[in-house]
Amino acid sequence: MTNPEKIRRLRAHDLTTMLQWAAEEGWNPGQDDASIFFETDPEGYWGLFDKKGLAATISLVTYSADYAFIGFYMCRPDRRGQGLGMRLWNSVSNDAVAQTIGLDGVVAQQENYAKSGFVLAHRNIRMAGVLANPADFTAPADLYDLKIDDIAIADAFEQSLHLFGESRLSFLKGWIGSEKHTALALYGPMGIRGYGVIRPCQEGYKIGPLFAENETDAECLFKALLSRRKNSLESPVYLDIPEPNQAAANLAARHGMRPVFETARMYRGTNPKLDLTRTFGITSFELG
């Protein structure tokens, strides 16, 4: 007997449903995430459909033949426990061509991911707090706004310091170029010595990435980004930090942020060994 469900690539409009599911699961996506994520890799989103419509989703965003990232592994509540998610997972992940694949999975699924060859690298912790604009902050002279014309500089900065697993110009075009996002950088030898992005989400704001040479620069960027919020100062701010970076935990604690969620960063293939000492905020749990 053939399966009545069908697997196909998602179209741009399907991501509205996928992001809504992510919001309902507590992942709190950004207001512009759907369009930015889709444009990063239009062929990287998959769904399993039944008679009611979309029943399960997964993304496999491929940055190059060397690196890809899995996210949005979800199933509609009424179809959970029926093997649909695993069927979609096997269909997509088994055909992946990237040498290394990363994911940020809920800790409860870590054992299942391990069965597919994924190895734990470290944990990421989502920190949250309702933060006022910093009253004592004065922008330094070497702080500037990153614009879409600066994405090549930002990408080169990430690659030279091993901050991301692969070049991601298509992603940064949307992430830095979005009118809803604010991207700030500190001047350095390569044009940048650190940068961060703040974006409005379904609830409050998220800061990510937050890359800096040291805790002092990270603190400066963090305060500068907070001061650029346009509204909803009573809403929470979220920062996803790699657990091994104690300086990032110190920064979050100084601002009264508390852990609310955690993920397991895992890789199948060669661990890219990112420089977590300079990573004070993960870009996103969905695309790495």
Image: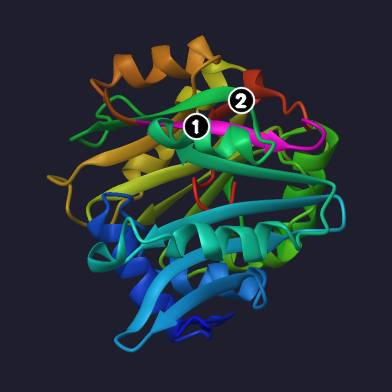
Where residue 98 sits, quadrant-wise, is bottom right
- Magenta residue span: 262-271
**Which residue occupies 79% across, 57% down?**
152
Total labels: the figure holds: 2
Q: Is residue 45 left or right of residue 83?
A: right
Q: How far across and how far down the image is residue 1, in percent? A: 51, 83
Check if residue 91 falls in the magenta segment.
Answer: no
**Which residue occupies 64% across, 78% down?**
42
Q: 77 or 253, which lies in front?
A: 77
Q: Residues within 10 Å of mark 1 (few under 14, many from 20)?
A: some
Q: How far across and how far down the image is residue 11, in percent? A: 53, 86
Circle 2/circle 1 CB separation < 8 Å: yes
Residue at the outermost front position: 1
Q: Which residue is mark 1?
A: 110
Q: Residues within 10 Å of mark 2 (few under 14, many from 20)?
A: some
Q: How far across and how far down the image is residue 221, in percent? A: 49, 34
Where residue 22 sits, quadrant-wise, is bottom left
Q: Is residue 100 left or right of residue 130?
A: right
Q: How far across and how far down the image is residue 70, in percent? A: 60, 53
Q: Earlier in the sequence, mark 2 or mark 1?
A: 1
Q: Which residue is mark 2?
A: 120
* One can see residue 186 in this view: yes
